[in-house]
Image (tube, helix red, strand yellow):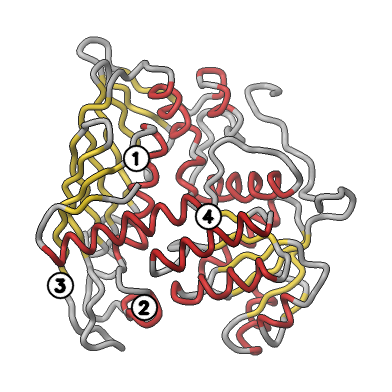
Amino acid sequence: MVGGLVAAGPAAEHEGGGAPLGVGVVGGGFMATVHSRAARAARARLIGVSSSRPERAAAAAAELGIERAYDSFDDLLADDAIGVVHITTPNTLHAPQALRALQAGKHVVCEKPLATTVADARALADAAASAGRIATVPFVYRFHPLVREARTRFAAGAAGRLLTVSGTYLQDWLLETTDDNWRVDENAGGPSRAFADIGSHLVDLIEFVTGDRVERVAATKRTFFGTRADHDSITTEDAVAVAVQTASGAIGTLLVSQVAPGRKNRLHIELAGSAESVAFDQEQPETLWVGRRKGSLLIPRDADQLADDAARLVTTPAGHPQGYQDAFNAFVADSYAAIAGAEPEGLPRFADGLRAVIVTDAVIESAEAGTWVDVPA
């Protein structure tokens, strides 16, 4: 660490060293842009992209500065120069594409939800383990430095025993009936939308910080707009409210909505321990609130004041904000480091993606049954 900053790591390389790691991207939308920026920041080689149509792949290659466009996913997988495949396609394509990439001997970074059924997610986690490949899921909010600081406080016992959890993830991008997207269609996005898409981040973050697991849920969900610009008879949910109990005996509430006016991407958690509370808001990621009976404080994102695992993720001096893309860059850099043989702390793998699908399945089951549901371990 020099001058309060963590020095940049080496360029992403193949497991044997030498040439930069070759990256293939599947899909050409917003998340492909985010993934490609992160791969470039990790100094990997962006070799090629495939998409739903050859012309769409060509447009994505030109827009994202990727070397070439493939006519098909098969062509991408056949390229031996590609060591890792980033999957950024609609949700129902994740499982079959990730499985084929693993079978082709590639490492995989797959967008969440990892799959739209528990069976498919479990099959993927098993396939990744059997293949001996690195397979990760971008639960990128883990990579905010102050999230790691909050995690350290719970792990070290500074927060005491977990008592209550409060979490919200609120957006407004689907607020109007004229707002539409493939995600509202169950055939493309899967049976759950709001919870699978953003509620999964919320639960993952709470479990990651506390080291505790959601054990029981009682949920209710609403689809406020059954008809949108390009879709009718919509069944995927706009919002979900969930009461939770954890394995340690803590209780809490979660609220997830994609129809909350003014909220662009507001993921907020407040976790009350018997000694102190911590609160993190990813729209305001430069401070962590630590609440105490006496002497509450705000901890800044300053490497000199943070635990080692938090400080290593600080890439700019305090006062020079880091945000979502920085967290994503750190996730991809750690994924590539794992490919090179390292064991980065807190890297979300396919087993974590399976966990998210299991929790989502329990939430939707509870909402439809109107009763408490146990979340399988």
How far is mark 1 from mark 4, CA to CA? 18 Å
Front position in the image: 32 or 339: 339
Q: Say few, some or many: other residues with alpha carbon within 10 Å of mark 3 (under 14 / 14 to 19 / 20 or more).
A: some
Front position in the image: 78 or 104: 104
Left or right: where 369 falls relative to 129: left
Instruction: Of the two numbered discs 1 and 4 on the same chain, state the one appearing first in sequence.
Output: 1
Q: Which residue is mark 4?
A: 350
Q: Which residue is mark 1?
A: 206
Q: Secondary structure at mark 1?
A: helix
Instruction: Of the two numbered discs 2 and 3 on the same chain, state the one appearing first in sequence.
Output: 2
Q: Amino acid at mark 2?
A: Asn
Instruction: Of the two numbered discs 2 and 4 on the same chain, state the one appearing first in sequence.
Output: 2
How far is mark 2 from mark 4, CA to CA? 26 Å
Q: Residue furthest top?
A: 294
Q: Amino acid at mark 3?
A: Phe
Q: Residue at x 56, y 46 (%)?
A: 326
Using the rendered view, name the quadrant where residue 175 is placed: bottom left
Circle 3 or circle 4, nearest the eye:
4
Q: Amino acid at mark 4?
A: Phe
Using the rendered view, name the quadrant where residue 19 is placed: bottom right
Instruction: Of the two numbered discs 3 and 4 on the same chain, state the one appearing first in sequence.
Output: 3
Q: Which residue is mark 3?
A: 224
How far is mark 3 from mark 4, CA to CA? 32 Å
Front position in the image: 19 or 280: 19
Total tally of numbered discs in the picture: 4
Q: Secondary structure at mark 3?
A: loop
Using the rendered view, name the quadrant where residue 258 is placed: bottom left
Q: Residue at x 35, y 22 (%)?
A: 298
